[in-house]
Image (cartoon, grey):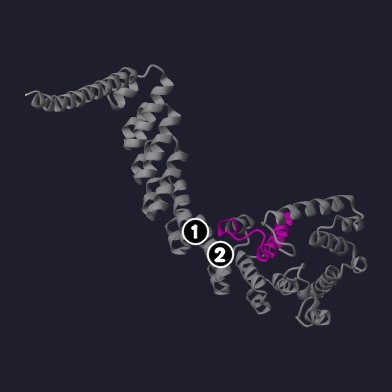
Amino acid sequence: MAGKSTSNIAPMIEREQRLRILILAAVAVAVVALAVSLAAPSGSGARRCNSLALSIGREQCLYQLALSSENATLCGSLGNGDSNSCYITIAEETKNSSVCYKTGSANGTAACVVYIANATDSYRLCNGLSATYRDSCIGSMAIRDRNPDLCAQISNRSNGTICSSAINLSEALRSGNASRCSGVENTTDINTTLAILGQSGIDSYSRAYSNVSNYLVYATFFGNNQFGSRDFCYLAVATQARNRSMCSDISNSTLQESCVVAMLQPVQVSNSLIYNAINYGQLAGICSNSNLSAGAAENCSNFITIVKAINTKNTTLCATLALNFSYECYAELAAQYYNASYCNYINNLTLSNACVENISYNSTAALNGTRQPGYP
């Protein structure tokens, strides 16, 4: 009997211990739940946010709730700045352009729609915007996709022409195919030409841009642009490809001659092998046998002297040139070798200071990887 009683007691004790543990666990859970309920506002969702005492906390709570639930209706209960941000964020996350129009900002709405139109490859979403924003929206997609046909959807004819011209210029440079230049509007309007260049995405440090920009500066300064933007396209492609035969596509005789002269520019001054291979007699022959006008032939000859001076670091050659060309020669030497001492040969204080500043800029750009030593 005693043994049997003892054997029954052990399981009973174990059961009681397990029961106590379960009870204690249940009590602990209840205590935690009670603490949470006392610490948090009553209700759920928006009601819980609205029960917060501080307006800052309430707005933040509603803002996060709107974003997490992608519920744009909640954005309307926020302040102007937060509500616009809320609408735009939800619109972009859900790719729902209709939400973009709930903002009180025309710029914000346009930026929101453009983002979604690009993200969904749907230019028709741009049609809901006002004319100016619509054109900008379609233009951005056309240039992104390199699709000049899409530019025809732009309501402002002038902007549509700039759009298609910029794409054709960009593609001509990218492919090296000068025939694409025929799709560039041949206008002499300087502002239109600048807009075409700006939208084309042409590298401002490239040789092509350097040659084109020189004539744009001339045209802007003298207010007499005789060069068509299509000719600038041919000039850019020819100089980038270093192909003199392409210069013949240029209709303006002055720009065509300049294109031939531009072919003489060295590829990179720091590469001595290129310069050691230069046959200056052959270059001089190009100047005299390219049917250049007297003025262009002289400029061609001066340029060869500058190239030779740079290659040999010979300032004496610079001194043989006419004043303006000699200044350019010294400045090029200084720029190519990042050596300000060459600027001291320039007697004009303003130009000498500009020479020094240019070295500082180019040195920084080269270190940052945005400009390579040598000609652009």
Q: How many marks?
A: 2
Q: x, y percentage for residue 166?
A: 55, 61
> Within the image, what quadrant is residue 177 found in?
bottom right
- Please give the residue where the numbered disc 2 appears in the rendered image: 170
CA separation, marks 1 and 2? 9 Å
Residue 128 seen in the current view: yes
> Looking at the picture, which amino acid does disc 2 mark?
Ser
Q: Residue, x 70% and y 65% (percent of image)?
A: 211
Q: Residues within 10 Å of mark 1 (few under 14, many from 20)?
A: many
> Does the magenta-highlighted stretch encompass residue 105?
no
| CB-based contact (under 8 Å), mark 1 and mark 2 | yes
- Please give the residue where the numbered disc 1 appears in the rendered image: 143
* Vertical side of 133 occupied by 5: above or below: above
Q: Nearer the viewer, residue 111 or 48?
A: 48
Q: Residue, x 73% and y 52% (percent of image)?
A: 364
Q: Residue, x 33% and y 38% (percent of image)?
A: 70
Q: x, y percentage for residue 370?
A: 67, 56
Q: Which residues are magenta?
A: 197-224
Circle 2 SS class: helix
* Vertical side of 21 occupied by 157: above or below: below
Q: Residue furthest front?
A: 2
